[in-house]
Amino acid sequence: MAFIEVQNVTFEYPGKKALDDVSFSIPEGSVVALVGPNGAGKTTLMRCLVALDQPQSGKIIMNGVNVEEDPRAVHAMCGYLSDFFGLYDALSVRQCLTYAAWSQNLPAGKIAKTIDAVAEQTELVDMLEKKAGDLSRGYRQRLGIAMALIHDPKVLILDEPASGMDPEARIGLSRLMRRLRHTGKTIIVSSHILNELEDYCTAMLVIRDGKMSEHVTLKDFSARAVKTLRIVIAEVTEAHMDFVSKQPHVSEVRIEEGIILCAYAGSDEEQRAFLKALVAADIPVLSFEAAAHRLYDAYMNISTQSAEKK
Amino acid sequence: MRYFISPELHRNLWQKFSTLHLVSVPFVLAMLCFIASKTDVDNPETAINGLMTVIFYLVFYVWGIYEAGTAVQDEVKSRTWDLQRMSAMSPCHLAFGKFFGVVSYTWYAGLATLAIFAYTFPLRGFSGWKSSTGATLEQTAYIVFFMFMIGVVGQGVAFLLSFADLSAAIKEKKKSRLPKANLPLLVGLFTSFTLHQFVMEGLLRGRLGTEGLYRYNKLVTWFSAEYMREDFMVFTLLFFALLIFYGIYRMMRIELMYPVWPVGWTLTALLIAGYSIGFMTVKSPTEQIVAAFMVYLMMLVAAYGAMIKEADDWQKLGRFAARIRGRNWRGALQGAPSWVTAAAASLACMAVMSWLAWHAHRTESDDKALHAIVLSATMFLFAVRDGIVMHLIFRLSAKTARFGFVLYYLVIYGLLPTVHMLLLNSVFSASDLANAVEKYLRKGTFGDKIDKITDVMSWYYPSLSLDVGVFVPVLVQIALLALWWRNVLVKGRVGHGA
């Protein structure tokens, strides 16, 4: 049964539809990547989900609660971290967490224990006495997530949590998200960095121009067995492109930075035959590999399809 | 401890009260008192009292109002507002925790200053009659209460307005991190200044006598009852403070997404109208009509103000329309913009006034009463026209809406009538106008010439004329705008994208 059910949601700014008749459902315990280009409506959708904004029309049901009718119940079951969030820089990490615990009405006797548990989960134990203003970007992000997690919400919604982070902080965030994945929470994460979402997401929602392009679980996508092949050829010509396009199981051939990329739906054996055919045709292949990122493949696949539909 | 005070107040106290902050207030005040006492060795209390008065106004009024006016907007700018909105704090805990939290330090410094003021006030001399008795304890208590409460009301107004200006702060947050509390600060200061003049008239000017605080107008007549002026001012300040804090509570409920019926603004306007007409004499039928017209006018102003405020809230209007289309009447009423209820209340007031005017016309053959009906009806229709234009301007371009508003008002209320009048000026001289007005005042009817001017002006302004034709221009304008709304905007220009 769907834990989050979104039905025909529309949200309009003057002269623009940020969300246009969006519908989808998310099962409990899923970790969903919400992807789409800038301005696609990701943030508006997330804010509607956590009842910070109300859509003009449509319905959102979260764990059986109608978001429009009881937004406070939705606030109680959600943890939310916006794309640009702030902290009380003058307070220590412990004070920030204490404030978050108080403001979520946690029982007084449980607060210290909860703070310790959340700090451990988010790897903030050594930072508890530091001022929030003195933390690095990565630790600030962790503190933001820790504050969102303090009341043990059933749903965690993170808007671009990795933006502006250095590689080390991103690895740390990825580790944290993998850990959260096993807590059974329903998590929705928006990000531009698809490779990292790959590590912990189980499904993907693609939104474009306010419309839901596709909703796929990565398992479904693997079953479709569509992958992206990356073929590096010395001096690509039209004839090379033509040859590749005509091969069985190949679709959506394109060139990016001199490298041929194509969607390939064949088996491993057929892929070997494809390489043999390239060599037999005397095409100077320098490299031939399947791209490793399923999420990236899925996104590219959906993007190409929706571009073709237009 | 959290059960006794709000988490929000606790957080603010953490941030505002370091040991240095705590110690610095008594230290600085002691230094200032010492310096002041050395400037007037014969009468140090007067010097200290004068200095404390200035410091109190600076700290409690200017600084306090600034702090209150920036509180919510600072949360938005520092991007912590969503965290608070999603917390489990009740609107009461969050609103008053935040208000008392942000002003806590100015209250600490202000009350310390006021304590010294209260101690020295009865001891100070007064220019011209230094040797006479100073203020009594009762008089001092009144003055201290007034000074404090006027500041609290100013701070409350600034805090309340910071909610109203929240959408501006949200748009502002991407551009600048600098606090922008211009409107709440200015209105808060203006409120305090106006109340100060109203409540403290004659006080602090060295005119204290033994008979009472005020030399003049010792009694206030309100709804035909007489009250001691000091007591009435206490009631007035408490009334406004309650109204403001209730408004703050409601605004916080809206921010926390609690269902709120859109009646707060209308009720506030009605209460203020009720308070205001209490000062009027309402006995004769004409006085009753005037009083009813005043209430109507205030309600219409309230509806107009709400329209200006809510014209940019396209989502709210969209939800309202969608719920009406879906026959969700309860949801539609609950989520209706405030101007809807204020406009409904205006119509109700207009009906009452019209009934009184019609009654006066029938019993006393008073034609002037009928003019009030026409004037109020055309005023309402012009407000409807302006409301449609406001929403259209926002619909067309939210970015240039403010400029669009100003341009619209300049053109429709300034440029077009001026051009028309200039064209008519060759036909009608100023003396024609003066004669027509005189005729109206004497006989209650317009002359032929002024009727023609009225016809032209009824395209731009509400009219008094009893001619049914005065309704035509504004109704035509409304019809054309409604058609434009329907055919051009709703159907044709809805784009896509975030």
Image: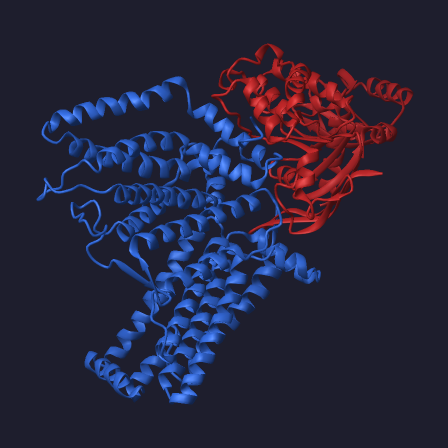
Chain colours: A red, B blue
Quadrant of the image containing the N terminus of chain B: top right
Residue lying at 56% horizontally and 56% vertically, measured from the top left: B262
**Residue B378 appears in which quarter of the rendering?**
bottom left
Question: Could you tell me which residue is drawn at 22 percent across and 37 percent down?
Answer: B121
Q: Report if residue B424 is visible in the image.
A: yes
At x 47%, y 53%, the residue is B309
Q: Observer-nearest residue: B205 or B424?
A: B205
Among the 4 quarters of the image, the one containing residue B33? top left
The answer to whether residue B169 is above or below residue A156 is below
**Residue placed furthest toward the top:** A126
In this rendered view, identify the residue nearer to me: B253 or A67.
Answer: B253
Q: Compared to B147, does A293 lie above or below?
A: above
x and y percentages locating residue A222 in the rendered image: 85, 27
Using the rendered view, name the quadrant where residue B474 is placed: bottom left
Q: Is residue A208 visible?
A: no
- Residue A160 location (% of width, % of height): 62, 28
Residue B11: horizontal and vertical position, in percent?
50, 27
B477 with respect to B286 (left or right): right
